[in-house]
Image: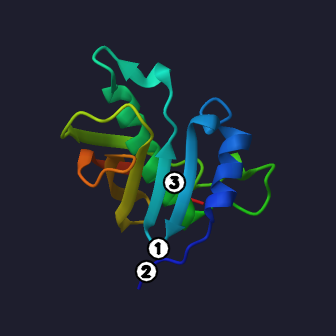
Amino acid sequence: MTAPMLLSPEAINAFFADHFPQIAPDYLVEETGPMFARVRQRFSEKRLRPGGTVSGPSMFELADVAVYVAILAQVGVGDDPRTAHLSPGALTVTTNLNINFLRKPDPTDLVAEARLMKLGRRLVVGEAWLRSEGRAEPVAHATATYSTPPA
């Protein structure tokens, strides 16, 4: 039995605008579904490294954000926008993230598709595949574990 989807892309984008204004303009949650999220990292010159490619830290950040979004979509952030940042979903933290860089990304938007493999009461395990916009082959693959505090 899959977990019900609790938050739409619009709700998560609004949550980011309210509670993560420092990064919200860089990301667009495009789709959420059962144990799934697709997140776009908008291209910016600040993401480039020498050689004209998107930097590893930028890809790492996208992988982390995408799996966090997949968790938020399932766990939610509560009903009151004033206390959403205190919900177990919002307080979920990364405990481990491993990333494999597979090929040089194009200097364009990156899109991550994240899937949750285990959604437990305290631990969540997920993965993210990152691709350059318009390309089929992945530029990176990440696996991540998160800790969710009790309600």
Q: Is residue 74 visible?
A: yes
Count neighbours of disc 3 (C-alpha within 10 A) and say few if under 14, some if 14 to 19, many if 20 or more: many
Q: Position of residue 45 (x, y in %)?
A: 48, 21
Q: Please tell me which of labels 3 and 2 falls first in the chain.
A: 2
In the rendered image, which quarter contains the C terminus?
bottom right
Q: CA distance from mark 2 to mark 1?
A: 6 Å
**Horizontal side, residue 80 vs residue 97: left or right:** right
Secondary structure, mark 1, is: loop
Q: Is residue 77 visible?
A: no
Secondary structure, mark 2, is: loop
Tell me if label 3 and label 1 are in contact, CB under 8 Å: no
Residue 25 higher or lower than 73, as above or below: above
- The disc at residue 69 is 3
Q: Position of residue 24 (x, y in %)?
A: 63, 38
* Residue type (three-letter) at the residue carrying disc 3: Val
Q: Return the residue nearer the eye: 88 or 115.
A: 115
Q: Position of residue 82 (x, y in %)?
A: 81, 49
Dividing the picture into quadrants, the one containing residue 48 is top left
* Residue type (three-letter) at the residue carrying disc 2: Thr
Q: Return the residue nearer the eye: 87 or 67.
A: 67
Q: CA distance from mark 3 to mark 1?
A: 12 Å
- The disc at residue 2 is 2
Residue 133 higher or lower than 24, as above or below: below
Q: Please tell me which of labels 2 and 1 falls first in the chain.
A: 2
Q: Please tell me which of labels 3 and 1 falls first in the chain.
A: 1
Tell me if label 3 and label 2 are in contact, CB under 8 Å: no
**Horizontal side, residue 120 vs residue 117: left or right:** right
Q: Return the residue nearer the eye: 55 or 64.
A: 55
- The disc at residue 34 is 1
Count neighbours of disc 1 (C-alpha within 10 A) and say few if under 14, some if 14 to 19, many if 20 or more: some
